[in-house]
Amino acid sequence: MFSRILFPTDFSEHAKKALECIAGFPDVKEVILLHVVDTSRPGFARWGIEMVKEQARKQLQSECETLRAQGISARAVLKEIPHGPVGEMVIAVAREEAPSLILVGARGKGILRDILLGSVSSYVLRYSPSNVLIMKHRIVEGLKGRAFEKFCPRILSRVLCPTDFSPPARQALATIAPLKGLSEVILLHVIESGENEEEIAIQEKEAIREMERDTLFLSGRRIRSRYIVKVGSPSREIALCADEEDVSLVALSSHGRGWLGGIIPGSTAQEVAKIAARPVLVVRETGTKTHKVPGDISVAAS
């Protein structure tokens, strides 16, 4: 999943620190650095555009050389967009390059600008054909020492996997299971509030039964796992649990049958990406074939 990464950058300090983190990811082999020059802003003369583009080329080349010095293949892509959302260009490049992952930040001076999720990050999360990793500004700002180890080379050390037991949710679990460095998975199911106590008790028993089957799948991969059941708002409980368990990553599907829902504004995946203080990996649903695990669960084949 981390072998080929598309990284849109605006050259902000947040972007530079995120790039340092990328270099530490497990199994990263190639990074495609993308910068988009937005010429739709008024007062942008042609000579000024060329100056901006030339400066961007130099910065992209410098960052490529830094990655190559660490044994990582790197390429630069510079695009100009005269109209339309910048996120649209990021998605167009993603469709051309077919990366295994797009990494976007959540704050910066340009295309990474919003404290929660900027317009570009939201656009990428909604329309990306690839898996998307959101790196929050609070993490990027503190990337040094133990924090760097936890969220960069050891980003898979303790992963929270929210699930509604839908095929896409189980495909997400099967997608991350083979990844190098995956040490522990914490399964989380949230029973939405508003049900009566009897219904909650029934749902809790069903959830435990389903998650016990998922732990059998993980144990077959020699991955340590445990499960948690919460009651409340799914996105809020996921964000709280991520902090309580001090996880290195939250990984969830872009689609689901229940509260995971579709990747549209207001969906659980979108909301978790906005409010969680940890890195959030949104696994894009694919047409991958499924196989059976103990208990007749269908999950994606690796």
Image (tube, grey):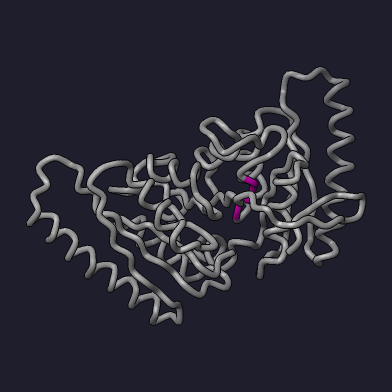
- Magenta-colored span: 249-253
Residue at 85% from the left image edge and 49% from the top image edge? 297
Asked whether 301 falls inside the magenta stretch, the response is: no
Answer with the quarter of the image where residue 205 lies.
top right
Quadrant where the image shows the C terminus: bottom right
Answer with the quarter of the image where residue 69 lies.
bottom left
Quadrant where the image shows the N terminus: bottom right
What x and y, as percent, mark residue 130?
Answer: 54, 55
Asked whether 250 falls inside the magenta stretch, the response is: yes
- Please, is residue 242 above or below residue 159 in the view? above
Asked whether, in this view, residue 180 is left or right of residue 30, the answer is right
What x and y, as percent, mark residue 61?
Answer: 28, 73
Asked whether, in this view, residue 236 is left or right of residue 74, the answer is right
295, 40: nearer the viewer:
40
44, 16: nearer the viewer:
44
Residue at 54% from the left image edge and 38% from the top image edge? 270
Residue at 38% from the left image edge and 44% from the top image edge? 120
